[in-house]
Image: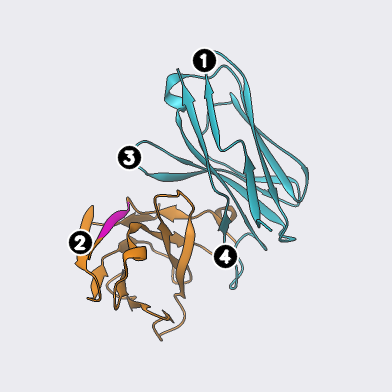
Chain colours: A cyan, B orange
Amino acid sequence: DTAVSQTPKYLVTQMGNDKSIKCEQNLGHDTMYWYKQDSKKFLKIMFSYNNKELIINETVPNRFSPKSPDKAHLNLHINSLELGDSAVYFCASSQDWGGSTDTQYFGPGTRLTVL
Amino acid sequence: AQTVTQSQPEMSVQEAETVTLSCTYDTSESDYYLFWYKQPPSRQMILVIRQEAYKQQNATENRFSVNFQKAAKSFSLKISDSQLGDAAMYFCAYRRPYNQGGKLIFGQGTELSVKP
């Protein structure tokens, strides 16, 4: 009965490869996010989608491409992986993108290790 | 740009005691929301408590309460009757309403350990 789920939980890959991380939420929320947590545990927003439309694109290399096939899914595809991409990636969702009662719920995270 | 600062990288508390985690933020906005998230070793980000800036009353959730000082831009988290399960990384976060796409701006985190 997981509210926000991500697959895979762990991903180990070689530099230069292309990989995807999938995210699904069953909360009926309109907005979904991708955050990156670096090795010092600092969390930073990468992308935000509302009703399948991109509303935030922070300064992220264009090797990262989010795709939202529907409101319940937001996938993250990464091309030409680099060592610096190693991090934990969190998906989150919220009812809306900033209302007074809005709260973001996080997935379990995907630990990406680039060798 | 808004920033969030947690000046205590690590804190320690004895079981059953009370501990306060500090958070300050910088903003020119008058309307915003503040959050505390907990990240245990399992890595899951769990919402602990939230505060709307327009509310003067401090939010409370069971053993967790905040001291929100809007003028001082301070948002500390108090954990009463600390339990072993409270051991985790705690993140303070800020969000503007309907702007910046609803993104959360996080502090650096405070690692809390609970001693039995």
Q: Please, what is the three-letter code of the amino acid marked with disc 3? A: Lys
Up/down of B87 relative to A71, above or below:
below
Disc assigned to residue A103: 4
Q: Earlier in the sequence, mark 1 or mark 4?
A: 1
Residue A47 % position (x, y): 59, 42
Q: Please, what is the three-letter code of the amino acid marked with disc 4? A: Thr
Q: In screen coordinates, is A87 left or right of A28?
A: left
- Distance of mark 1 from mark 4, alpha carbons? 36 Å
In the image shown, does B3 or A19 lie closer to the viewer?
A: A19
Q: For mark 2, what is the residue? A: B12
In the image shown, does A74 or B18 lie closer to the viewer?
A: B18
In the rendered image, residues at marks 3 and 2 fall on the same chain: no
Q: For mark 3, what is the residue? A: A40
Residue depth check, mark 3 versus mark 2: number of the one nearer the observer: 2
Subunit bearing disc 1: A
Q: Earlier in the sequence, mark 3 or mark 1?
A: 1
The quarter of the displayed image where residue A73 is located:
top right
Residue at the outermost bottom position = B57
Q: For mark 1, what is the residue? A: A14
